Amino acid sequence: MARIVVGMSGGVDSSVVAMLLKQQGHEVIGLFMRNWNDASVTLEDECPWIDDSRDAMLVAEHLEIPFQVLDLSAVYKERIVDYMFEEYGKGRTPNPDVLCNREIKFDVFLDEALKLGADFVATGHYVRKEVVLVDGIEEYRLMCGKDKNKDQSYFLCQLNQFQLSKALFPIGDLEKSEVRRLATEGGLGTAAKKDSQGLCFIGHVSLPDFLQQKLKVKEGDVIEIESDGVASKRELERMQSMQGLEDFRHWHSSFSSLDGKVIGKHQGAHFYTRGQRRGLQIGGKPLPLFVLQTDVLNNIIYVGQGEDHPGLLSMGLFVMENESCWVRPSMRSKVLNSNDLMCKFRYRQTSVSCTLNVHDFGYQVVFSEPQKAITSGQFVAIYLEDEIVFSGAIL
């Protein structure tokens, strides 16, 4: 039997993970990660960490396993929070949950678990891990969870082979309803607890207040781009077909060549993201306004009317080499020559057919049909059947 450290979040999923591993005869240790200690930007009645740590402790007591709280707030601020400020300042929209898994749960937390003599770290993610032999060497496949409504493989898309070799996902083959049933049958106090909805380190958060801690308010123009002008339409069609690196670099300044008019003011381009509808506070238009692009350098927001505005569409995206991840590097040649790839560029979206091509300084993902609101800084995850094979931050 193995010594396994379980990342106990205080939710039903990680509680059941600890219970199942204990039932299997493993030596189980429960660790709760405290990643944030600043309540000034959280909604106090929604701030979860104190209640969650208590719930995790009570489950550990019920299961009669050791339990402790691990304070990772300092390293979390350095690796995740400061990174978020930096990315928003550049006009990109980062995904803290993907980064939390790569940088905290399966790096810093994993290191702490190994110091305790752990053979593995287990979490309550709805994903599966499979072991295959390639030229006599074990490789680890990162697979979608059985419950397609709860599949969390997207959030783990940046994990490498070492991290996967030490990871266990005991509920990846279960449906959520089965997990709750097992929790009820096992007498776990978290059996009926609602799933968390907030950012992985804060919970429910006032994001504008959070960002304004370091990003200054700076008034600028909101420019509307019409969707029916001949010149605008031609330029927008060219934007939709962007694939190469130079095309994507040009993207951030290309809206300035379109015919547009100033229709209002904003408080800082870095507070907005492509595809955003709420927060513009500009009315009087036949259709809702959406952010088509932000220009942080010149502090301009370009908007258009309606969710079908062509300025929201793109035929591809670009990933820089230094922001890419091959989950199994041995799959590179097969993936680059495959016409059976699917991708996601946000959680819970329907997978999109695509191809992956090598380009100068990185990779281009080309969609089979135009996609809406591709957001710089988010992650694209590419699947071959049910396996994640590649991922990267969107340029």
Image: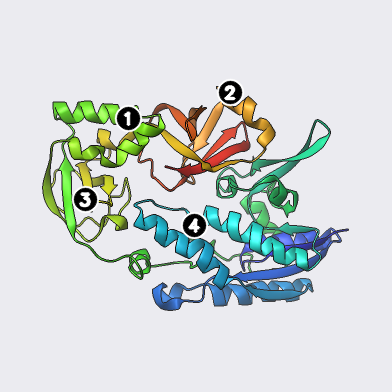
Q: Which residue is mark 4?
A: 96
What's the residue at 41%, 59% (across, down)? Answer: 86
In primary-sequence order, the first of circles 3 and 2 is 3
In primary-sequence order, the first of circles 4 and 1 is 4
Helix, strand or loop at label 1? It is helix
Marks 4 and 2: in contact by CB < 8 Å?
no
Which one is closest to the eye, mark 3 or mark 4? 3
What's the residue at 22%, 51% (across, down)? Answer: 298
Task: Report crowding for label 1: few under 14, some 14 to 19, many 20 or more residues within 10 A (C-alpha).
Answer: many
In primary-sequence order, the first of circles 1 and 3 is 1
Horizontal relation, residue 285 to residue 378: left or right:
left
In primary-sequence order, the first of circles 3 and 4 is 4
Helix, strand or loop at label 2? It is loop
In primary-sequence order, the first of circles 2 and 1 is 1
| Disc sitting over residue 338 in the figure | 2
Helix, strand or loop at label 3? It is strand
The amino acid type, in three-letter code, at marker 3 is Ile
Marks 2 and 3: in contact by CB < 8 Å?
no
